[in-house]
Amino acid sequence: MLAGQMAVTHALAMELMGRAHRAEHIPQLEANGALATKLLRTYVAQVEALAKLRRGGEQTVRVEHVHVHPGGQAIVGSVTHQGGGGERKDGDEPHAQALAHAPQPALRSQDPQPEPRPAAGARAARPQCRTGAAACTGARR
């Protein structure tokens, strides 16, 4: 039913845009143009409704910036939630066991004492090379 409404809305909007293009008087142009604009807004709302119906009403949440404090845990990557709630009938949750028994060592830097660096976007003087150093670390090219 929605697809049929979309087809009729689009066809009528295109017809009104053609009438506005062929209009000989300003009032005809304004009336046809205004109606075409309203129909095209309706069409956009219909397209969004159809997309929502096709994806089952699911929404995607994207987190851009996360703080993980010492002792905290985080998951990097896509996270999907199966839903359903309640107990599983078979009582088996291999994904939970795998996560609970897979401790990983902390990621450490190769440089035990990293040199402080200016914040992104901050203007700072060029780093000075150490005496006798073959290359200057942190220098921009």
Image: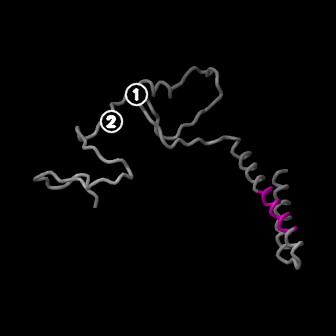
Chief SS of the magenta region: helix
Determine if the magenta segment contains residue 93: no
- Using the image as rendered, state which of residue 131 and residue 14 is in the foreground: 131
Residue found at x 67% / y 40%: 58
Q: Measuring 28% from the left and 61% from the top, which residue is drawn there?
A: 141
Rendered residue at 53%/24% (across/down):
93
Q: Is residue 85 left or right of residue 100?
A: right
Which residues, given as a range, are shown in magenta?
31-43
Amino acid type at circle 2 is Leu
Q: Which residue is mark 2?
A: 107
Badge 2 density bin: few <14, some 14–19, many ≥20, Cα 10 Å: few
* Rendered location of residue 98, percent (x, y): 45, 27
Residue 5 vs 26, above or below: the answer is: above
- 96 or 38, which is in the foreground? 38
Q: Which residue is mark 1?
A: 102
Q: Position of residue 15 (x, y in %)?
A: 85, 69
102 left or right of 5 in image: left
Tag 1: residue type? Answer: Ala
Horizontal placement of 42 versus 84: left or right?
right
Give the colour scheme shown.
one colour
Q: Give the alpha-carbon distance from disc 2 to disc 1, as whole Å.
A: 15 Å
Furthest residue toward left: 132
Q: Secondary structure at mark 2?
A: loop
Q: Is residue 33 magenta?
A: yes
Residue 12 coordinates in the image, percent (x, y): 86, 64
Q: Which mark is residue 43?
A: none
Q: Nearer the viewer, residue 63 or 4?
A: 63
Establish if 74 lies above or below 44.
Answer: above
Q: Nearer the viewer, residue 139 or 118?
A: 118
